[in-house]
Image (tube, coloured by chain):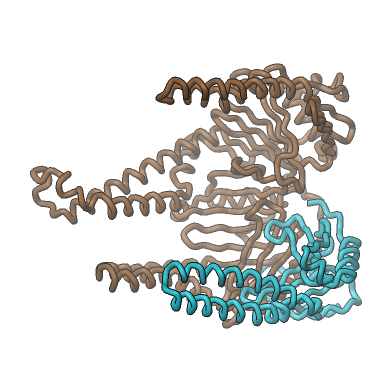
Amino acid sequence: MEFDALERDAFRPRRLHPLTLVFEAIRVARHLVLPAIAGAAGAANDGVARTLAVGLGILAVPAIAAAIARYVSFRYRLTDDDLILDSGVLARRHRIIPLARIQNVDVRQQPLERIFGVASLHIETAGGKKTEGVISVLGRADADALRARLLASRDAAAGAATPVETLARLSTRELIVAGATANEIGVVAAALAGLMQFVEDRLVEYLPEAIDPAALPALPPALAIAAFVVAGAIAVLLVGWILSIVGSVVGYHGFTLERVGGELRKRYGLLARREGSVPLRRVQAVRIEESLLRRPFELAAVRIETAGATVPGQQRNPEAFVPLASREGAAQLVARLLDGFDPGCVALLPVHPRARRRIFVRLAVPIVLVAATLGPLHHPGWLTLLVLLAPAYALAGNAYANRRYAVVDDYVVARDALLGRTTWVIPRRKIQTVHVASSPFQRRHGLATLVVDTASGPRGAAYIKDLPEDVAFDLAQRLSRRVPERPPVPIP
Amino acid sequence: MVELPDAGIPSDAAASPPPAGVDRPSVPGTHAPPLPDAGLRPLDPRVVGYWRIRLAAWTGATAIAAAACGAWLADTLGAALIALAALALAGATASLLPRARYRAWGFAVRQADLVVRRGVVWRTTSIVPHARIQHVDTRQGPLERRLGLARVVVHTAGSVGGAIGIPGLALPHAESLRDQLAALGGDDGV
């Protein structure tokens, strides 16, 4: 990493890259000027169009002025311990971000920023509910150097010459597989439901006329409708599937995850390039996610949860996410992240056998309700829904078999499955709070859910459902106790 | 401290045997009855009145809304019946629920953690290790202030247990609890 740019005058206040003005202008344009033009073009009445254009034009003037002011007033400065951000013209803002509190620093490049060779720096700290500081935009070299400086104190502690160990690297082929097998079941189901509704409401009346009887002489209308529905469903599925693949290939292009000393570094993105790093000791939990489509192929994704901000609208951040790994690869990755702990080598214990029945009942109740109301009221054909109870029973059995947990010296492993399967691995020293929760149905059978909470994101808690109540309380008691922090074990 | 029978818990049996002392409590000699009772203390009984007023306000508003809907949909008699039914339901809830809730609530400050139990229907027992406490607040709404009650809210960095509140404490008690927990609170990094 090149330090020279900052080394000479590291402590002097510095400005953003002059191109900031261009990007601010583009931002203003996107928000105001384009709607103005579109509005003007779209408005039928010339007077309305003119008023609209003029109005938005007037709004654009202060916006552009503010953009210029933002550039002119923004300064960033490094001291030995802090990063200091000064901004604002009328209301001055002086932000001090202690370097010790910085969780991770992302260098991000939007497509246009890549063309101009600039980048923005996103700084996240522990406990923040949003990105603590954004420095946008800097020259690429400056951004890299500043990132290195911000993380230097921590790197110095880890030792200067640290080997780079590649944890994961994904080829385009693997990304295609990742996209193809990513869990899009929810989206597909919603799309299918919408389509079904549409067919129910509209097409039933029109179809017999719309379809040329000569073309489909043998098909009775009901079958034609069914064929149409199936074709529509397949089309929706295909489009969603292709979008998922394209999203994966574009979003994660060139995905690399490396371990450099005590730090995790990730790089990916075809259009918008993302580079980030997380100190390994900030890893709160690791989640192995096997979607329905991946389970038969023994494929998984690995989500590495870290403490820090969760920015709405910016997914998969600041956590690191490995979109695809084989099941063994995932376990090995976890082992390299968590001081050699391989969750695959731990015997997982089952929960209470009644869990099977509870899962089945939860699946069966909606099916029976729909069949029992629509069957008599609408059409007896709805009663065929009850056939679904058989797969539901099988699914419940599988879910029960996969609902397992283990508590070992330094780690908690919690696995749950319905269609997909998720395995949590939580270092015990990262546990924040522990809860034992029970519904009336659980209490009737002496069951409870153990909730192991960590400081990672909105879904940062592992749930071990349907444990015997006494086991849940014992585990809660033990897991809430301190496990002494250990120095990270270097991995040969 | 009452030693928990670690050997009786099946989880460790399956894994490799843990090194001695890993799970033993670090501070011996303190009394802590095992969960779920854990020697929990109740809230201030006045909280029942507070909950009752709040519930009555909510359910009363709902009953009025139900009566209005009834008047709009049905004739006067129907409306009166619907209003009566809604009021009866509201009254029953407001009179029975707070007491049940009071019985369900309990908390204890122990050697190494805070235990909070709550919930009539969905019952939750939370354990917040002192080391995980980030900061502690006391809060009072207008009604609580009038009744001399306060809530203590314990904040951790956790995602689902980020803020755990203990309502219905007498203000001086709430303040001393807050100070006690704040003093015990760790400065654990995340």
The image quarter in which residue B75 lies: bottom left
Indicate left or right for A486 with A193 as reference: right
| Residue A165 visible in image | no
Indicate left or right for B140 with A54 as reference: right
Identity of the residue drawn at 70% across and 81% down: B99
**Residue B181: x and y, percent?**
87, 64
The image quarter in which residue A80 lies: top right
User: Looking at the image, which is closer to me, A288 or A355?
Assistant: A355
Hue of chain A? brown
| Residue B110 visible in image | yes
**Residue B20: x and y, percent?**
81, 69
Identity of the residue drawn at 47% across and 50% down: A183
User: Looking at the image, which is closer to me, A341 or A367?
Assistant: A367
**Residue A50: x and y, percent?**
50, 20
Q: For the view shown, which residue lies furthest in the front direction?
A: B76
Identity of the residue drawn at 17% across and 44% down: A210
A127 vs A453: above or below: above
The image quarter in which residue B61 lies: bottom right
A165 vs A484: above or below: above
Identity of the residue drawn at 62% across and 73% down: B122
User: Looking at the image, which is closer to me, A52 or A141?
Assistant: A52
B190 vs A238: above or below: below
**Residue A475: x and y, percent?**
71, 72
**Split into 4 quadrants, where in the image is the C terminus of chain A?**
top right
**Split into 4 quadrants, where in the image is the N terminus of chain A?**
top right
Q: Which chain is cyan?
A: B
* Tag count: 0
